[in-house]
Image: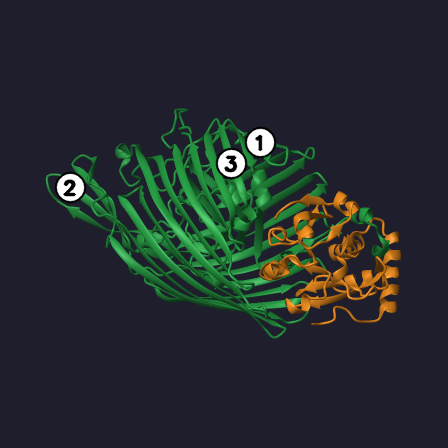
Chain colours: A orange, B green
Amino acid sequence: MAILIQGSGARWRWGWLAAILLAMHAPVRAQVDEYQVKAAFLYNFAKFVDWPAQSFRTPDEPIEVCVLSSNPFGSSLEQVIRGKTAAGRPLSARKVADAPSLNSCHILFVAAEDVKKFRALAPKLRGAPLLTVGEASDFISAGGIVNFKIENGKVRFEINVEAAEQGQLRISSKLLSLAEVVRQP
Amino acid sequence: MDLSSANLEDLMNLKVTSVSKRQQQLARTAAAVFVISAEDIRRSGATNLPDVLRMAPGVDVQQIDANAWAISVRGFNERYSNKVLVLIDGRTVYTPTFSGVYWDQIDMPLENIERIEVIRGPGSTVWGANAVNGVINILTKNSKATKGGLVKAGAGTDMAQSVAQYGGEIGGSANYRVFAKGLYTGNSQNQDGSAAYDRWSRMQAGFRSDWDLTAHDSLTVAGNLFSNGARQTQFQELLPAPFLTPYGQPVGATGGDVLSRWDHRSDSGTETSIQASYDWYRRSDLAGPEVERTFDVDFQNHVTAGSSHEVVWGLGYRVSDSGVAPGYWIGLKPAFQTEALYSAFLQDEIRLSDSVWLTLGSKIEHNSFTGFEWEPGVRLVWNPEGTRHAIWLAASKAIRQPSRVDAAVQFTTPALPIGNNILQGYVFSGNPQLKAETMFDYEAGYRRQFSKTVSLDLSTFLSFYRNLETADPGALEIIPGQSITVIQTIQYQNHAKAVDYGGEVSLDWKASRRWRIQPGYSYLHATIRNVPGTNGTPAANISQMFPQNILQIRSQVNLTRRMEFDQSLYYTARLPGSAIPGDPRLDVRLARRLGESTEVSVTGQNLARPRSMEYGTSFGVLGTYAERSIYGQITWRF
């Protein structure tokens, strides 16, 4: 169980700022790396999803954002959630490799190449209050709840509301209104 | 723009860049590779596999009649082209009878193709014999990606087709699809405008299933059955003039294949696969009934060794049983024979630095005709990290092993009068002592992504061929009598050499959000010489076999969110001396989506001319004229 990101926040933030300044001066509107955007989405999902009370032991227990096996985010996820809160809770990120280490996760991101691995884990996760987020065409059919798609170069997502209900996750209507809603038992 | 404070709406409006691992790998491939995507296939409006292959720059696709094609890469193109290896899901589909492909036998529902990878130049280091001038690797979709139903029906002035398919889940971890396709192509036209005798109909049914056995293992089982009924106008090319009359010949073929592949991927990234396939057909064509059965098993292992070695190695065994029933005017001697091919290969991709990769490898094979053959290759690519361009160099040796026809054909024409009291006949025979045709090939290429909308691919080659097959006239046998009978013997020999050079360039330009243009051009210069002191024919019609210039422009336009307008223009000019003039070919498609599940399209093919002959006569099959045609099609998914 490796810690996803460690490192010197301040230096990175200045680098980030410099990059933004450069981007503002660039003649063409800069495009952003797919995973920076997906990381920002994950943070937003934390804000617009309510977990059942029993999935936290203490009122200030962090919302854990877990990434299965391969981590396509680099440091973007850590960048986005550092210092942020959702529903009064801080957020933390870590990488997970197997089912036992998933216990304290609230959000689980599954990269496209790990769908097979997820498919094997899915029966154990059935009904757990875990917001699973993927990015593969067969992620929903593998039992996932939210699935990213790229359409015309923009990130879109679908939500399987049946799977969310099974995990007693309440997804805000705002999030649902932006998603492509699917119902797949 | 701090993403961490961006709201959902902002995020949804952000354009993102994504570079897939596959694209990254493609960028540093030290070979001339072109990928035809499923989207390209759909938008081409093509109804058969040969028409799909036209899209790959450098692939020379020429229709002979309504059901026969000549398809090759970098020359040597004729009906029985034998220097390009064609694979479907890793299963080689060339026939051991003549080491080429019966294109009418391997058609499939085109919507099930995931992509087609076309490699120009040798792929012999990994793929072995016959991957001399190119490799065409057709990959079908995983059945996970084809869930639900599909019904397609189309009809037009020249053809009709229908596809029915259904896919679903078996339990929680497996998927399947079953499908059937029917295709009918009408007669094309003779020189004098009359209907040619070459219509074609085909029925095919098949399935594919994919099982996720564990998180690390998957299994694929697939199979097909087909039945073809066609007609051809053929004639006996060796007969003297007055007897050179064309005749109508029904051509029938039935066959099938089954394939099973097990893939294992370990946590450490090691990939192992075992694939077994069985393929058979029975065909009545030029000769008597031809039968073929092939069993093939392949093992492959991909290991990452340390931080700088990617090793792929494999073992293969292929056994085929093929023959032509005796008693017809073309036969094989022996009529039936079993041959085995044992092979092994090892390839190591070595990371010399962050931007330079060196690939070394070789295939070693043992075949029933020429014994041991080895096909080494070395490739180098320079792809500076963080940049979007690459330069590559390659040197390889490739061989084409003799086929059953090369070694064992027996073809005797009756002695016919050619003058007063003189009769002439031919005895044409294969040569069991033939050597493998060998090529030494040197390539260089450049690939560049100028921006998100423009990319360029350039490749050049210089190839030296030796031991090319020739048909050499032998002794005249004179039988005295009331009339004198002269029998000319002809036998295959390895008496030609060739030096070819040329190159291909292609551009992919997304001119706007709605318009994509892909021009391509390829040039080929070929010189074929007989070995001094010999007078064999290297091939029937040399200039016809070598396209000197191939030009193509494809354009895809999204008129509205639901309407597509696509055009393809192809032009092939052959070496000077070819009987076939350069003819442009224009295909245009207009399609509209109705709702989420239905697409209606109208496609015009061969629009540039009222009619055109693309290749002409090849191996006794009369070349015919394809007419301008139009067809409509509806595709419904549920």
Question: Could you tell me how far apart the alpha carbons at marks 1 and 3 are, in whole angstroms?
Answer: 14 Å
> In the structure shown, which secondary structural element does the residue marked by tag 2 occupy?
strand
Disc 2 residue type?
Ile
Mark 3 is surrounded, within 10 Å at the Cα level, by few (under 14), some (14 to 19) or many (20 or more) other residues, namely some
Q: Position of residue B607 (x, y in %)?
A: 54, 29
Question: Could you tell me how far apart the alpha carbons at marks 1 and 2 are, in whole angstroms?
Answer: 64 Å
Q: Position of residue B19 (x, y in %)?
A: 68, 55
Q: Position of residue B102 (x, y in %)?
A: 39, 45
- The answer to whether residue A97 is visible is yes
Same chain assignment for discs 1 and 3: yes
Mark sitting earlier along the chain (2/3): 3
Q: Position of residue B282 (x, y in %)?
A: 31, 46
Same chain assignment for discs 2 and 3: yes
User: Which residue is identified by label 1?
Assistant: B601
Disc 3 residue type?
Val
Residue furthest bottom in the image: B306
> In the structure shown, which secondary structural element does the residue marked by tag 3 occupy?
strand
User: Which residue is identified by label 2?
Assistant: B484
